[in-house]
Amino acid sequence: MKKTITLEAIDPLEIYGSGNRIFEALCSYFPDLKAVARGNEIHLEGSGEDIDNFSGKLDALIERRSHRMNLTPYDVEELFDGETPYDKYMLRGDAVIVYGTDGKPIKARNRTQEAMVSAYFANDLIFATGPAGTGKTYIAIALAVRALKNREVKRIILTRPAVEAGERLGFLPGDLKDKLDPYLQPLYDALGDMIPSKKLQGFIEDGTIQIAPLAYMRGRTLDRACVILDEAQNTNLGQLKMFLTRMGRDAKFIVTGDATQIDLPHKEESGLLKGMELTKGIPGIGCITFSNEDIVRHPLVTKIVRAFDRL
């Protein structure tokens, strides 16, 4: 039996994916079905049952695309088993996101981190807010490294607003890079735990991994990238909007911040919570909130945070 499906009122690339990755993922569930994509037409040859099942899954994928900014091969997997990839390896007791350079697994360490990982797979943009030491940035970078290793994205972009926490940029020695590196060092540290130093340096040199202050994001369109905005509480609403509107095709955006540690001269100018409220309820955007109970650093950190919260 033969059948031709014509994709109407939708860009075929949105369904096929970059390099036909999504289309090939869908076809992999039908080994006895010959499926060829040519422009906006899909030519099928096989049993009537396979063709009907394929057509049904394709319709479901198109419907899902209408509610999502973009699709990934994971969306195909969910159509067949109703679980995100992370749900499945959690159920198997294997919650590893990536392996560190020392061979140790990097995984979610509490339910809120698990929720953050699940939200990442279910959305194209997630906000993760909460106190210091909860692992927001670390988990975000682990997810980005995983996506790069699995070739889900072509690059990782990490950014922070260059806002001083009590010091002044001009007092630091060196050129602009030297002055900015201290602000970005936590990002380098996390990457260094997951990617060998020589390989990491190569990624930075060829642009596969980019670490830059937020101001450098203006005017860019970020396609096929996992992009992390850290310390987002130090952005105003205009800067946050500028960052979020950089999102291009097949991109994942993660925004992390702690609303209790605003370093702006006027704390009320912080755009993090305002931005979360404005985008609340938009399909494809998830929000995860960490609490003091989620702190995974030294046990004293939890006590310190609670002490300062009482001020």
Image: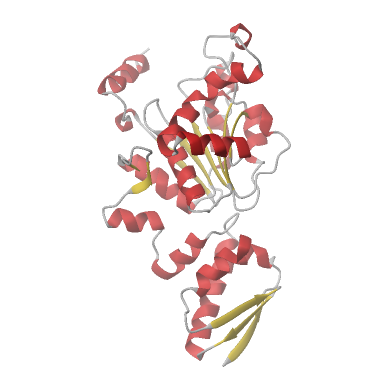
Report whether 106 appears left or right of 62.
left
The residue sitting at the right extreme is 219
| Labels in figure, total | 0
In the rendered image, residue 301, in percent from the top left (x then y), is placed at 31, 21
Quadrant of the drawing holding the C terminus:
top left
Residue ID at (50%, 39%): 199
Residue ID at (50%, 90%): 47
In this view, 1 is above or below 280: below
In this view, 156 is above or below 297: below
The residue sitting at the bottom extreme is 1
In this view, 126 is above or below 136: below
Q: Nearer the viewer, residue 27 or 201?
A: 201
Q: Where, by quadrant of the figure, is residue 209 drawn?
A: top right
Residue ID at (45%, 39%): 195
In the rendered image, residue 98, in percent from the top left (x then y), is placed at 39, 45
Residue ID at (34%, 19%): 305
Quadrant of the drawing holding the N terminus:
bottom right
In the rendered image, residue 267, in percent from the top left (x then y), is placed at 55, 18
The residue sitting at the front extreme is 198
Q: Nearer the viewer, residue 281 or 214?
A: 214
In the rendered image, residue 81, in percent from the top left (x then y), is placed at 39, 68
Report whether 132 appears left or right of 36.
left
